[in-house]
Amino acid sequence: EHKKVIEEIALAGITKVSEGDLPEITKDTLYIGSYAYRSTIVSSPVDKKVLFAEYMADQMNADFLEVPMNPSKEEIEKTLFEVKKHTKVVYGLYNGHLNPGQIELANEISRMGQTLVAVTLRNPTDLTLLDEKIHKIAAYEYNTHVFDALIKVLSKKAYATGILPVRLYRESVVFSSRKVKYHLY
C-alpha cells in the first residue's frame, strides 16, 4: 500500500512547464544525463546507484548516453554527434545552474533542430536558462519513483499535474511563499 502512495506522490509532483503538448516519445528517442551528486563546498561526491538516462532508456526500450555533469566544449561536440542519430532527446538536468555545460548542451541540441524534452531532476529554476522551444518538465528529485512517474507522463499514460512552487522568469525567480527575489547567475 505504501508503494502505491509513493507512486501517486511522485506522479502528482511532475510539472509540465512549457506550453503545448509534449512530443510523441518513440524508440528513436535518446535519453541523456549524468549521475546525481551531492553539491557541497568541500566536494561533490557522485551517487552511482542509478543513471537517469540508462534507467529511462531501459524502461522505454530506447538508447541512452551518459554525459558528464558539466560537459566541456569538446564533450558537447561529441554528444551532439551522437544526438544527430536521433530525432528526439530527453535530457535529465541536475543542478544546471551550477554546471553551465548542461545548459549549453541542452540549448545546442535544440538549436540544431532536434526535439528536446528537458527534465529538471532537482532545481526547476534551471528551466529559465533554456531556449523557449525546448519542452520543459520539472521533476524535483533524482530517484526511480520519479523516473517511473516520468515514464507515465512521457508515454502519455498520465498527465503532468504538478504545480511549480516558484514563478519562473528568464532572469530571476520569485519564491511564492516568501516574496524573495532570487537572481540566477
Image (cartoon, rainbow, N blue to C red):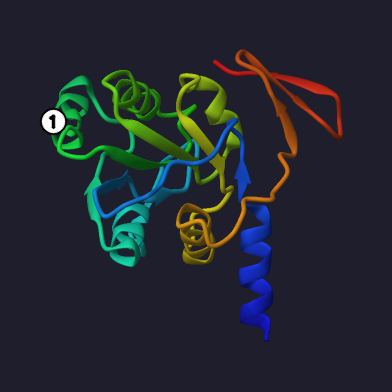
Is 45 placed left or right of 160 in the picture? left
The residue identified by callout 1 is: 81
Question: Which residue is drawn at the image coordinates 63% and 45% (left, top)?
Answer: 15
In this view, 39 is above or below 184: below
**Where in the figure is residue 63, as x and y percent of width and height?**
22, 53
**Where in the figure is residue 45, as x and y percent of width and height?**
38, 49
Q: Quadrant of the C terminus?
A: top right
In this view, 141 is above or below 10: above
Question: Which residue is drawn at the image coordinates 47% and 65% (left, top)?
Answer: 144
The amino acid at mark 1 is Phe
**Where in the figure is residue 129, as x and y percent of width and height?**
50, 21
Q: Which quadrant of the view contains residue 89? A: top left
Q: Which quadrant of the view contains residue 84? A: top left
Question: Which residue is drawn at the image coordinates 36% and 30% (left, top)?
Answer: 102
Given residues 8 and 20, the one toward you in this image is 20
What residue occupies the far right of the structure in this picture?
178
